[in-house]
Amino acid sequence: MVPSCVFAGIGGYYASKQSGLAGVFRRAADGSDWKHALSEIEAFTVFVHPRDPSLVFAGTADGVYRSTNRGQNFRRGDFPDRGVQVWSFLQDDADPKWMLAGGSPVSIYRSEDAGASWKCMPDPQLPIHAKMPFSCRVMRFAPHPRRRREIFAVLEVSGVMRSTDGGESWSDCSVDLLRLAEAEPRLRSKLVSDTEAEGMLDGHAVCTSSADPDSIIIAVRMGLFRSKDQGKTWQDIRVDRFSPFTYGRDIKVSPQDPNTLYACLSVAASSKDGALYRSPPNSLLTGKITGNFAESGHPRRFSCLINGRIQWLTAKFATQRNREFPNAYQGIFNEEQGNCNQATAKPPNCDPTRCCAVSAVLPATELMRRNELTLG
């Protein structure tokens, strides 16, 4: 059996200021030594093709880089534009050669040959809800589980958008997020923009599940929010009822149980504190997030986001059951976020939302099967 690998994509202010840290790092899933697979450029995301693990993609500061040998080395793909940051990927389950890439400034690229070549799709033409000192980006995609070509994307810092034609055109789904910020003082946050709705528009992740196909859940600065009407309205899941951390960094559905959610929460854009929480079964139906798999520990240089932490924590705590808060507060892990601190003077041109962009991926099928998730 070909061994599974872990990938870490390193970008942002921290990486750009530290010689030799930017790019893509690779190691065996059961190993401890990291190898620098892509060193000449910042990488904001790493994506392993779910049908063909020999294909690994890096979203970089200059388009898409592609590996055809399980990430041993990378070459820049046939990408039409220079200087476009790529922050996200999506592959169509029905067509393994069909892919989307999300860029910054906000842009969509499509491939129909498994990522060998790309073309730029029409401008999404979204309204500008917040004037930011940096270009907004497409952080994550989530397909509708039953309606092919219906796709949601979360934007940093510009809310949510939806396509019903595979990315040819997009509509804005952020109006109700703006309404919530206006109606609820606790949902207001303004750091570097011209609006107190900035925090509600600061999208980091989005997910959908076959257990509740018409639910869309997003992770934003102000917490976790759900829509059941294609983004027309949003409801606050109120993760603050259960967690001392509310800054939504990531949200994913368990690959083994579509009713179970994992949420990666922190306290701020630049912080060494955070936790990974697991919901009880049927949480997509009940809206509850009450359990955790977090731990205390010293920060690691390549601290994984949610995918890697799920695999590592479920292997270590294979029989742990969900706990009601506040007991679960004891679970805190540290994340290396870099040197930018919003509470102190920032370096020139520092973007506080990307001080350290770290992405780790464990998508290989054999690893998923080996680390079956034990549900409480």
Image: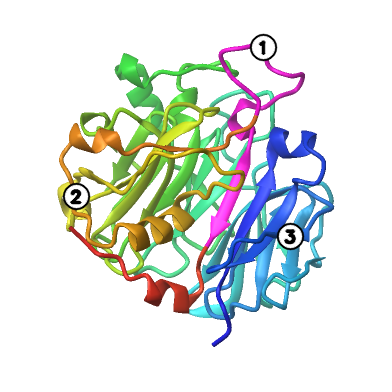
Q: Is residue 151 magenta?
A: no
Q: CA distance from mark 2 to mark 1?
A: 40 Å
Tags 2 and 1 in contact by the CB under 8 Å rule?
Answer: no
Residue at point 42% right, 35% down? Answer: 274
Picture quarter with the C terminus:
bottom left
Q: Residue beneath label 3, please?
A: 64
In the rendered image, which quarter is residue 267 located in?
top left
Q: Mainly helix, strand or loop, the magenta region? A: loop
Dot 2 lies on which element?
Answer: loop
- From the image, tell me which residue sits under label 1: 345
Query: In the rendered structure, which disc, 3 or 1, sits on the residue that comes first in sequence?
Result: 3
Is 91 situated above or below 203? below
Density class for disc 3 (Cα within 10 Å; few <14, some 14-19, many ≥20) is: many
Which residue: 54% across, 46% down?
303
Tell me which residue sits at (47%, 16%) in the image.
Answer: 196
- Measured as percent of width and height from the top left, residue 36 is found at 75, 59
- Residue at image mark 2: 322
Q: Secondary structure at mark 3?
A: strand
Which is nearer the eye, 106 or 211? 211
Query: Crowdedness of circle 2 by 10 Å Cα count: few (<14), some, many (20+)?
Result: some
Q: Amino acid at mark 1?
A: Ala
The numbered mark, 3 or 2, whose residue comes first in the sequence reads 3
